[in-house]
Amino acid sequence: MSEALILTPQQIKRKKAAGEPIEPGEDELIRQHTITVLVENSIGSLIRVINMFAARGFNIESITVGPTDDLTVSRMHIVTTGNQRIIAQILRQLSRLVDTIEVEDLTGINFVERELCLVKVQYTPQSRAEIMDVNTVFRGKVVDITPNAFTFELTGPTPKIDAFINMMRPHQIMEVARSGRVAMQRNHFPD
C-alpha cells in the first residue's frame, strides 16, 4: 500500500503555478512558449544562447535571429516547450548571459507571430487544379513551377502553415523549408 502524499495549500498553489502535477499520476502542464531576447549584435551571441540550452538539456523547436532598427542590437525569437518551472529557469539563464539586454516570454500575452514556409509539392494533371485551389484558400504564392512540381511560398501564423502542409500531404510533398517564428507583442509601447 502506497502512502498518500499530503500537500499544504502553499505547496498546491506553487505546483499549480509551475504546471506540476498535484496528484500522483497527473500530467505536468507543458506548453509551447515563444521567447524574445534582445542581445548585443556581437560575435558569439547566438552560440552562447544555443550552448545554454544544450548544457541544460532544453530543446529549441525554432530559433530566428535578425537585426533590429538599432544595428548594434539583434532580436532572437526562440520557441521551446516546458512547464512554468522550466520556462522560468530558461528566462533566468537567458537574462544572465553576457550580451543579453532584455528577455520576454510572449506566451499568455497578446502578440502577433509570422512564419515563412516554402513547400515543394509534386503534381499530376489530375491533381493540379486541386492543389492550386488549396493554395488559393491559404493565399500562398507560386514561386517556382516545373513540369512535375510546384513550389509555394506561404506566410502566416504557425497553425496556418501547419494546416497548409497537412492539406498538401496527400499530394506528395517533396520538400519543406520553414523559417521559424518571429513575433512581436501587440500594443506594446516602451516607457
Image: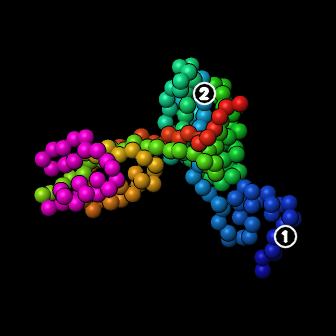
Q: Residue at x 64, y 28 (%)?
A: 100
- The first of marks 1 and 2 along the sequence is 1
Instruction: Name the residue rendered at 53%, 26% in the picture.
Output: 68
Give amino acid for label 2.
Val
For mark 2, does the 10 Å Cα neighbourhood hold few (<14), some (14 to 19), or many (20 or more) residues? many
Question: Can the viewer see residue 58 in this picture?
Answer: no
Looking at the rendered image, the quarter that the N terminus falls into is bottom right
**Residue 117 to residue 40: above or below:** below
Q: Nearer the viewer, residue 97 or 160?
A: 160
* Displayed quadrant of residue 185: top right
Question: Of residues 76 and 106, which is closer to you in this image?
Answer: 106
Q: Which residues are magenta?
A: 126-150
Image coordinates of residue 66 in percent, x first then y, are 49, 29
Q: Judge left or right: residue 125 versus residue 2.
A: left
Q: Quadrant of the C terminus?
A: top right
Q: Position of residue 4 (x, y in %)?
A: 81, 74
Q: Residue at x 57, y 52 (%)?
A: 32
Q: Amino acid at mark 1?
A: Ile
Is residue 113 visible to us here? yes
Name the mark on residue 132: none
User: With respect to residue 131, does 150 lie above or below?
Assistant: above
134 magenta-colored? yes
The residue carrying mark 1 is 6
At x 55%, y 31%, the residue is: 75
**Residue that numbered label 2 is attached to:** 39
Residue 9 on the magenta segment: no
Disc 1, SS: loop
Q: Residues within 10 Å of mark 1 (few under 14, many from 20)?
A: few
